[in-house]
Image (tube, grey):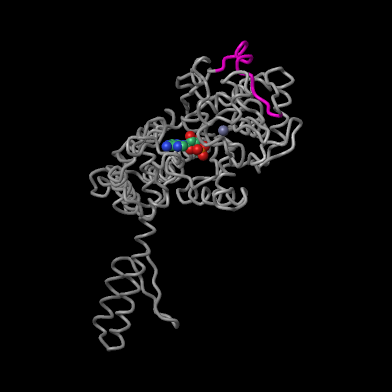
Amino acid sequence: MELYKTNQLKIYNSLSKTKEIFKPILEGHVGMYVCGPTVYSNVHLGNVRTFMSFDLVFRYLKHLGYKVRYVRNITDAGHLENDADEGEDRISKKARLEEIEPMEVVQRYSIDFHNILQKVNNIPPSIEPTATGHIVDQIEIIKTILDKGLAYIVNGSVYFDVLKYNETEDYGILSGRKIEDSIHNTRELDGQTEKKNPQDFALWKKADERHIMRWPSPWSDGFPGWHLECSAMSTKYLGKTFDIHGGGMDLKFPHHECEIAQSKASNNVNPVHYWMHANMLILNGQKMAKSTGNYILPNEIFTGENKLLKKAFSPSALRFFMMQAHYRSILDFSNDALEASEKGFLKLMEAVDQIENIKENKTSSIDINSWKQKCYDAMNDDFNSPVLIAQLFEAVKYINLLQLGKETLSKADLEEFKALINVFVFDILGLQNEVSKDSSSKISGVVELLISMRNEARANKDWALSDKIRDELLALGIQLKDGKDGTSFTVN
Ligand code: AMP
Ligand code: ZN
C-alpha cells in the first residue's frame, strides 16, 4: 500500500496562513510548479536554498508514493531590471555587456544552473519549460483577459487592469497587501506613464528599438510581461487548477499575486490549492542577492575560494547545513555555521558506515517503530527536516550503543533500521556519503602501498615480512590474491 494512505501530510499554505492536511486534486497524483531562475548570471547560494527546499518536497512526495509532475521553468525573456535600470531585459543587458547573443547568455547560465543543482544532488524536474518556448501560449492568455475586459491596450502594450479586477476579485489575496499600498515599485516594466493606474502590470510590452528580444503579436512586436510565463506554463502542463505552487518568499508579491490575478481573470478559477514559500538565505544580516553584491556562489563553497570561508566544504555538507533549517525559517549563512553542520554531517555519515558492523540479536531493546514514527511525524509536519535530523542523531546514539552491545536489535528490526536510515538520509534528505567514498579510495591507496612493500620484501626474500603483511591484512578482512598480472585484493 502506498505510504500516502497511512501518512497525514500537512503543508503550510501561504494563502490560508495555516497548516492544512494535504489532499491532492487527483488521488495519488501531485502537480507542482516552482518558479525557476532567470538565467542571466550564475545562481547564488540563496537561489540554491530555495531549489533545495523544493527538492526536499519533491523527494518526500515521491517517497510517499505520489506520482508527481514537477514543473520548474527557466526564465529566458521578459524579466526586466527594476526602474533604476531603465527597464532593460536582464538577459539582453548581459548579452550587450558581453557582446554575445541573448541565447548564449541563456545557454551559459542554464548549464551553470543544472551543474550546480546536480552537484548538490537535486533531482531534475519532470518538465523544464522556457518562457521563450511559450510565447504563443502567453499571447492566447492575453487575448482572453482582453476579451473579459480586464486588460487594456496602450501604444502596442497591454496592461492588466488591477482596479477593475479588484471590483469583483481580491487582488492581495495571497500577499495580504491592500490595493492602495500595492504600487509596484520594484521589477517595474518601463513605460509606467502609459498605465491607467500604478498598480497595473504589463502583460505585453511593445519593444523599443533597443530591445532585441522580440516577438510578433496582435498588438506590437514585443515581449511578454514577467508574471505571465508562469501562468501560461503552469496551466499548460498542470491544468487550470493544480496542487502546489512554490517559490521564494520574495516572489509572493508582486509575482505570485499577479499570477493568481492572471489565472483567475482568464480561467475563472483559483489556480493553486497550496502556495508554498521558502524563506531567504541571509548573508551579513541581509538577504543574499545578486543585485546588491551580497552573495556567495555555490562553487566558492566547494573550492573554499571566498574570503568569507576558512576552508572548502562538500556539496553534502552544504546540503546538510540547508536541511538543518526548516524551509520556512530564515537561514543565516556563515563559515562557522557551515563548519558546525559539517561536523554533524560527518558524525552522521560515520554512524551510517558503522551500522554494517552491528550484529543482530535474538531480541530488541530499542523500539524501532516508535523511532520510525517520529521521523515520519517530522516530515509530515510541513517537511520539518531539522526535526527529522534530530531523530537521525537519536539513531546515531542507538548505533553507538548497539556497537557496544548496550542495546540490541533482532534480525528483522536491524534490517528495518538499516533500510530506514538509508531512506531518510539518502532518499529523502538527498545526502550523499562522500565520506565513505572518500575513505574507501584512501583505503585502496593504503592497500596498494602495502602490496608494493610486500613485493619488495619478496624480491629481498624477506618471507617473514611478506607473510606478515598478507596475514595481517587478511585478519582485517582484506584478502590478497597473487596472479599472473600481479597482486589484487578483495575487501570482505
Ligand atoms: P530569481 O532568478 O531571482 O527569480 O530567483 C530564483 C529563486 O531564488 C526564486 O524563487 C527566489 O525567490 C529565490 N531566491 C532569491 N534570493 C534568495 C535568497 N537570498 N534566499 C533564498 N531564496 C532566494
Ligand atoms: Zn514564476
Quadrant location of the C terminus?
Answer: bottom left
In this view, which residue lies farthest toward the top?
Answer: 167
Residue 102 makes an appearance in the image: yes
In this orientation, which residue lies closer to the viewer: 390 or 138?
A: 138
Q: Position of residue 416 (x, y in %)?
A: 41, 43
In this orientation, which residue lies closer to the viewer: 158 or 344?
A: 158
In this view, which residue lies farthest toward the right?
Answer: 218
Q: Quadrant of residue 145?
A: top right
Determine the residue positioned at 63% across, 27% down: 202
Q: Position of residue 442 (x, y in %)?
A: 34, 65
Q: Position of residue 116 (x, y in %)?
A: 48, 49
In the image, residue 491 above or below residue 117 = below
Residue 58 makes an appearance in the image: no
In the image, residue 211 above or below residue 273 = below
Determine the residue positioned at 66% across, 30% down: 235
> In this picture, which residue range is highlighted in magenta?
156-171
Q: Quadrant of residue 53?
A: top left
User: Is residue 250 within the magenta segment?
Assistant: no
Quick check: 27 left or right of 222? left
In this view, which residue lies farthest toward the bottom?
Answer: 460
Q: Position of residue 303 (x, y in %)?
A: 38, 56
Determine the residue positioned at 51% across, 52% down: 115
How many numbered tags mark residues here? 0
In this orientation, which residue lies closer to the viewer: 99 or 319?
A: 99
In the image, residue 283 above or below residue 150 = below
Quadrant location of the N terminus?
Answer: top right
User: Is residue 168 within the magenta segment?
Assistant: yes
In this orientation, which residue lies closer to the viewer: 398 or 292?
A: 292
